[in-house]
Amino acid sequence: MRAQGGRMTETQLILENEQATEQLARTLAALARPGDALLLTGPLGAGKSVFARAFLRDFCGNTALEVPSPTYTLVQTYSAEICTVSHFDLWRLGGPDELEELGWDDARDGVVLVEWPERLEDLTPADALHLALTVGPDGVRTAHLRGWDGRSDGSALLATVSA
């Protein structure tokens, strides 16, 4: 996740198990700050819910935090020490114009974690961290990260996730 020659590069991490996904989430939660957006994509079973739950619990400093899926409510908001964090699931969103009703502009003052971010269309934050989780035919899960240039590099993330 660092810029090389003015271009954003992608970091790819193999996630050996659920604990590696959780560790990646905790590492990124420690790097997150007000105004950040994490855009989470991936097929069913790739680990999006595991990632979101671990990220929110760590960012909020509460390992027992109840983290329901926002599939039907579209957004769940949590209080953290440094700011509010909002978890959006935009699958059922009719269009980006509906984001105003969900409090998107206010939520951007804190941290936003967004599932189905392609539904943001023109509202996609330019400085977001794009996190795509994939599952290969062999069942191996991989995280592809792009964004947050200069915040952390791929080798540091790899060392943290592998530990």
Image (cartoon, grey):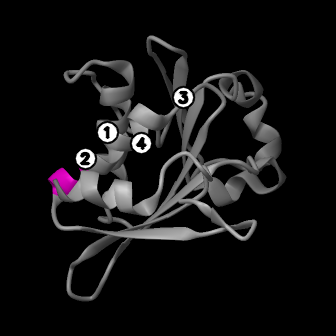
Image location (x, y in percent) of residue 3? 65, 62
Q: How many marks?
A: 4
- Give SS at disc 2: helix
Placement of 93 over or under 147, stated as above or below: above
Question: Looking at the picture, which amino acid does disc 1 mark?
Answer: Arg
Which mark is nearer the camera, 2 or 3? 2
Which comes before the other along the chain, label 3 or label 1?
A: 1
Q: Name the residue beneath numbered marker 1.
A: 26
Please tell me the numbered disc located at residue 52: none
Which comes before the other along the chain, label 2 or label 3?
A: 2
- The Cα atoms of the two marked residues, 3 and 4, are separated by 15 Å
- The Cα atoms of the two marked residues, 3 and 1, are separated by 16 Å
Q: Which residues are magenta?
A: 18-22
- The Cα atoms of the two marked residues, 4 and 2, are separated by 10 Å
Residue at left offset 55%, top offset 45%: 151
Placement of 81 over or under 158, stated as above or below: above
Residues packed near mark 3 inside 10 Å, few (<14), some (14 to 19) or many (20 plus)? many
Q: Name the residue beneath numbered marker 4.
A: 28
- Give SS at disc 1: helix
Q: Name the residue beneath numbered marker 3.
A: 86
Residues packed near mark 1 inside 10 Å, few (<14), some (14 to 19) or many (20 plus)? many
Contact flag, marks 2 and 1 (Cβ < 8 Å): yes
Residue at left offset 71%, top offset 31%: 104
Please tell me the numbered disc located at residue 22: 2
